Image (cartoon, grey):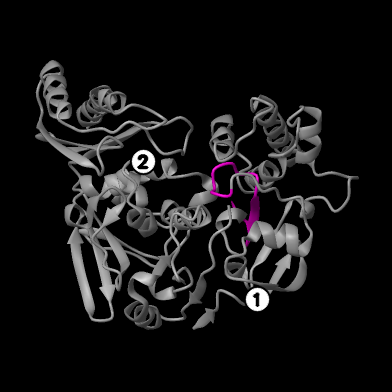
Amino acid sequence: MKPARFDYACPDTLDEALALLAEEGPAARVMAGGQSLAAMLNMRLVEPRVVLDISRLHELAYITANDLYVEVGAAVTQRELLAWPALADKLPLIAQMLPHVGHTQTRARGTVCGSLAHADPSSELPLALALLNGEVVLQSRTGIRTLAARAFHTGLMTTAVEPFELIRAVRFPVLGDAAVTAFTEVSQRHGDFALTAVALTGDRRRIRIGVAGVEDRPKVLDLLWRDDASLQDEIQAKVSTMHGSDDIHASGAYRRDLVPHLAMRLIEEARDALSAR
Amino acid sequence: MRYLRADAAHPIAVTINGRPYAVQAEPRLLLTDLLREVIGLTGTHTGCEHGVCGACTVHIEGIPQRACLTYAVQVDGRSITTVEGLAPSAAPLTALQSAFREHHALQCGFCTPGLLMSLSHLVESEPDADEARVREVLSGHLCRCTGYQGIVDATMDVLAAQRRDGAT
């Protein structure tokens, strides 16, 4: 389908973008790579009066790292983050997940922050944000605020971004040397939206399992190392209270039933990685 | 700031297959429609118009991307290659196009332009790509005729030939 008519604004500076947002508020939609938004525009699921294209803002095209976190600006594409030389060292989980975010062809335009803004319940980057306890930096003309993952992602394709704000950047925490990470998902075609995606972070004491695709937003399970049978029972029990919804691709029950199987696969991987050290 | 009104056509300067074009586009005009309807290059196909099928894949600044998830106004000043830019005439075809023919990598041909754009970039930029990598790139395309095997065979053939030629 073709989108409804919209004004197209391509600001040269972040200040110009924020001024336009302050003026237009809910009538404007911010577009970075447009790999989710253009699809929604084409299907007329959204009909903004103005599309504000931030993809050419050099101020938002940066990746910086310190000992605590990696900050990725809103104009950075998934392809650019995947090609960032320090990725596997600083953010091994993101390095494992990014090849599953869309396809090569959509990662060339699609941005890291745009995927978070879209907040699809089964997408990988919101799962990484939740599991790593990341933060999203929001900016408006009146200032900057930082939200934790749980406060940012408020529900099904819904975030706490106000109409006059844009996502400036995301911060993914850097895990210590003791940490292991793992990721797997079940989807109908590589790169399609996952039915269920599961990610793990852990060390010799603890395991954290993140689940996407079942509920309206990612859920994190905190576990301690035990024998496999007990771990599987515990995951099963925690997952049994999750409310999965049915759609054309799979039932909620099936999506939920995948979780213990996928999680145990990751736990085995993590155990092997830890014992190899 | 460039601010383009919804109900007017705006000048766009774009280079397509090495040739500069000066055209007019409303903000909501898709790059697929710019190529097909305004410029008349109908090799780029319009399938799903929401980024799933891959038939519209073109190179923007040398990188395969979805033309249906890109608006014409966004490519102002950019350089684009479409399937017409691969081989200027039917003889000679590129090595990949010839391999598609030899391996029956197409039947109806609807998905082929997009596939050629993704795979031509792959064989150029990743000469050491293995079959798993080829299939990963293919995952961004839907083909309802071939079952993909012929497409994989054609691409692997070109990669092997490149390596042989490079070694001699």
Does the magenta portion include B58? yes
Looking at the image, the residue that sits furthest to the right is: B91
Compared to residue A255, the image places residue B113 above or below, namely below
Specify whether A72 is left or right of B163.
Answer: left
Amino acid type at circle 2 is Gln
Residue A239 horizontal/vertical position (percent): 17, 28
Compared to residue A85, the image places residue A251 above or below, namely above
Which quadrant holds residue A5?
bottom right
Letter of the chain that mark 2 sits on in the rendering: A
The residue located at (37%, 77%) in the rendering is A24
Does the magenta portion include A171? no
Specify whether A254 is left or right of A47.
Answer: left
Q: Is residue B62 visible?
A: no
Letter of the chain that mark 1 sits on in the rendering: B
Q: Nearer the viewer, residue B99 or A139?
A: A139
Q: Circle 1: is it few (<14), some (14-19), or many (20+) Cα within 10 Å?
A: some
Which quadrant holds residue A74?
bottom left
Disc 2 is placed on an element classified as: helix
Which residue bears the numbered disc 1? Answer: B9
Residue B152 horizontal/vertical position (percent): 65, 30
Q: Nearer the viewer, residue A134 or A32?
A: A32
Amino acid type at circle 1 is Ala
The disc label shown at residue B68, or none? none
What segment carries the magenta color?
B49-66
Which residue bears the numbered disc 2? Answer: A96
Specify whether A173 is left or right of B112.
Answer: left
